[in-house]
Image (spheres, helix red, strand yellow):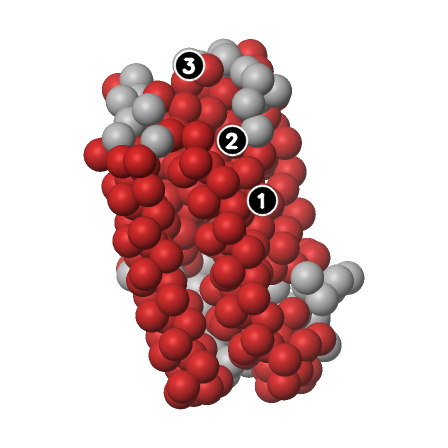
């Protein structure tokens, strides 16, 4: 009986995108927003460990379920045909087993917090698991990605405070991340237009066409407005992080406006620094 490929270490590194860690940063920073905002810059060490580890597990699981969902598309696209599942280096069933295993470990971790956080984690798993399929049905999978990544901020707030209804801040952070994802992931999708049309999947970049760059900048400005509303609740020192983040983001906007769509992928790669700089405001304050 022929053995199904389980993949070498290098195949799993590629499958989990560990060689391209920008996605991990884009999930980590919103999660830290919630953790740092809820604790005024001093999160419980246990929660910090749980959520940082959880980010790694959930981002990895998200990459696996994405490639599992796209296993019929990826072999026909030059950029993705060498991905481990598409290339036959890792069997789809093996990848799915890895996805379930990572979810199990993540849920074990979150079970060390509170029943509320566990309930929120279940919703987060659904957001992450459904996301790869959204581009088949809507031109706005980027918004769904923002909800999946931004849910970490809500969970982190709940872990530190025991509540998600006592303040608008976790929901402002959640909304900010949806807008942020619409910005950076639309920029990413600009470079994928030809392939997306070829395999008949949807994206904001396809729907918006020539208006894509304006939408990238516009949604990013709305994101900064939501983050400003959060900073307003924390005093003068909290504005330090917002000013740094806004300055960096405005520089990205100016580069994209001057250089056009050719700079859309560098814009995506450099966007995660905005999230890190905003974190600094909570640490300083």
Disc 2 is placed on an element classified as helix
CA gap between label 3 and label 1 equals 27 Å
Report the residue marked by disc 3.
112
Q: Residue at coordinates 55% horizontally, 56% vertically from top-left?
A: 222
Please name whichever residue, 108 or 246, is drawn nearer the observer in this view of the structure.
246
State the CA–CA distance, disc 2 to disc 1.
Answer: 10 Å
Rendered image: mark on residue 175: 1
Local secondary structure at mark 1: helix
Residue lying at 49% horizontally and 40% vertically, measured from the top left: 229
Crowd tier of the residue under label 1, counting other residues whose Cα lies within 10 Å: few below 14, some 14–19, many 20 or above: many
The disc, 3 or 1, on the residue closer to the chain's N-terminal end is 3
* Residue 227 visible in rendering: yes
Taking the view exactly as shown, the residue that stands out farthest to the left is 284
Q: Residues within 10 Å of mark 3 (few under 14, many from 20)?
A: some
Where residue 124 sits, quadrant-wise, is top right
Q: Would you name the residue on which mark 2 appears? A: 169
Point 61% across, 64% down: residue: 70
Q: How many marks?
A: 3
* Residue 25 in view: no
Q: What x and y, as percent, mark residue 226? A: 52, 46
Which of label 3 and label 1 is nearer to you?
A: 1
């Amino acid at each position: 009986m022929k053995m199904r490929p389980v993949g070498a270490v290098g195949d799993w590194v590629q499958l989990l995108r560990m060689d391209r860690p920008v996605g991990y940063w884009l999930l980590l920073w919103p999660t830290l927003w919630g953790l740092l905002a809820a604790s005024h810059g001093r999160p419980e060490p246990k929660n910090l460990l749980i959520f940082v580890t959880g980010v790694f597990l959930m981002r990895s699981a998200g990459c696996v379920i994405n490639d599992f969902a796209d296993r019929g598309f990826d072999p026909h696209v030059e950029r993705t045909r060498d991905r481990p599942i598409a290339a036959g280096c890792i069997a789809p069933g093996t990848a799915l087993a890895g996805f379930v295993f990572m979810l199990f470990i993540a849920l074990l971790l979150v079970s060390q917090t509170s029943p509320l956080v566990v309930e929120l984690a279940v919703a987060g798993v659904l957001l992450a698991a459904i996301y790869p399929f959204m581009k088949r049905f809507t031109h706005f999978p980027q918004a769904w990605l923002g909800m999946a990544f931004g849910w970490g901020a809500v969970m982190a707030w709940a872990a530190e405070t025991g509540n998600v209804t006592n303040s608008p801040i976790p929901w402002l952070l959640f909304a900010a991340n949806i807008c942020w994802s619409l910005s950076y992931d639309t920029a990413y999708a600009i470079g994928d237009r030809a392939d997306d049309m070829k395999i008949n999947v949807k994206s904001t970049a396809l729907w918006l066409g020539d208006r894509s760059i304006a939408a990238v900048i516009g949604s990013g400005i709305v994101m900064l407005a939501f983050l400003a509303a959060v900073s307003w609740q924390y005093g003068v020192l909290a504005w330090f992080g917002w000013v740094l983040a806004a300055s960096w983001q405005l520089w990205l906007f100016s580069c994209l406006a001057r250089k056009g769509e050719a700079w859309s992928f560098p814009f995506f790669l450099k966007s995660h620094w905005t999230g890190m700089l905003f974190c600094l405001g909570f640490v300083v304050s």
